[in-house]
Amino acid sequence: MILQQSWIIVAAVLYFLDLVKPGALLLTTACSSFFLSGFVGLVSDVSNAKEGKSLIKKYKIENKIKKEIFKNIEFNELEIRNLNYSVENKQIFKNFNLEFKKNKKYLIVRESGKGKSTLFRIIFGIIKNHSGDIFINKNINYKDLSDKQIKKIISYLPQQPTVFDDSIRNNVNLWDKSIKDEKILEALKKVNLLNIDKQSLDTKINPDNKNFSGGEVQRMAIARALVEDKQIIIMYEITASLDKFNRKSIEDLVGDLNKTVLYISHTTELDNKNFDYVIKL
Ligand SMILES: Nc1ncnc2c1ncn2[C@@H]1O[C@H](COP(=O)(O)OP(=O)(O)OP(=O)(O)O)[C@@H](O)[C@H]1O
Ligand SMILES: [Mg+2]
């Protein structure tokens, strides 16, 4: 603006000294305005671009810090705060709060059709369109975590685990060769599948022949979760199809795990001494 005004003063002086014609004067003034505004715009664009660049740089640094913080989360607690979730006008969770602590065992009981699977999907990060927040260790918000990062902390055991027509080894390590036989054997021992030694890791599990009972398959699925080494294991109705004896021994086993366990069930017939908390929803 100042540049433009000075140009007009110079032009007026030239006119009074009779050195330029009025037409030329008008034209140069208009042009000066056009070029000067272009020039000023250019200067401001350059400064905006600089500002943008520094913002991008700041964003990149912040993301890098976040990634570093979230790379290896040492889980201490998970907290669901004020959860609200509806599906097809049906409110499944209303102002719902829940907290899980490291290495504690939680039996979560809710009637059929009332939201157990939904709760698991929310904790596992599959359902995101709920209101309220989920925090890990008080300050890490689920919203800042990718699905991959959530799955690095939590593993999930379904009611009917998938059995592959393959060796015991591959059924436990799921073809992850970095999981060594020693670790697999240790996990199998923990779940009381004791008669499996190094050679028998090559034994094929034939899902059709049923050379493994339902209880043994569930134990193997728990061993799968153990070698994965996640800090939280969600067990969803894992003993629902087992007889009383197998159910009891799996519950005893759950009580001894060095993990946080969320054991979701529709019944409270379970042996509660294996759980630190029984939460009826
Ligand atoms: N995608 C969906 N569309 C419509 N309704 C749904 C959907 N998902 C869940 N629901 C409803 O929400 C309610 C809770 O479902 P959810 O599967 O979480 O119950 P649940 O406690 O796991 O039941 P179950 O013990 O039978 O497994 C049910 O009434 C169900 O019909
Ligand atoms: Mg369900």
Image (cartoon, grey):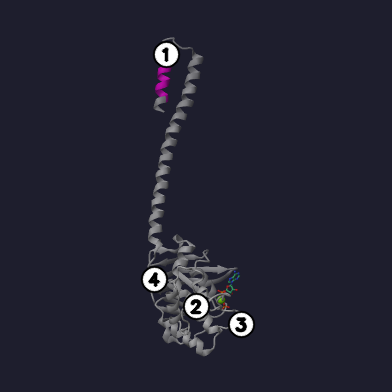
Q: Is residue 225 above or below residue 194?
A: above
Residue mark closest to the camera, 4 vs 1: 4
Q: Secondary structure at mark 2?
A: helix
Between residues 218 and 270, which one lies in front from this camera angle? Answer: 218
Magenta span: 4-15
The disc label shown at residue 201, or none: 2
Between residues 30 and 201, which one lies in front from this camera angle? Answer: 201
Q: Could you tell which of marks 4 and 1 lies nearer the N-terminus?
A: 1
The disc label shown at residue 14, or none: 1
Q: Could you tell which of marks 3 and 4 lies nearer the N-terminus?
A: 4
Q: Could you tell which of marks 4 and 2 lies nearer the N-terminus?
A: 4
Residue at mark 4 to residue at mark 2: CA–CA distance: 35 Å
Mark 4: amino acid: Glu
Within the displayed image, which quadrant is ligand 2 positioned in? Answer: bottom right
Residue found at x 44% / y 83%: 253
Residue 99 placement (x, y as % from top left): 41, 73
Residue on which the image places disc 4:
77
Residue 139 placement (x, y as % from top left): 38, 64
Residue at mark 4 to residue at mark 1: CA–CA distance: 80 Å
Mark 1: amino acid: Leu
Q: Secondary structure at mark 1?
A: helix
Residue at mark 3 to residue at mark 4: CA–CA distance: 42 Å
Q: Are marks 3 and 1 in contact (CB under 8 Å)?
A: no
The disc label shown at residue 209, or none: 3
Q: Secondary structure at mark 3?
A: loop
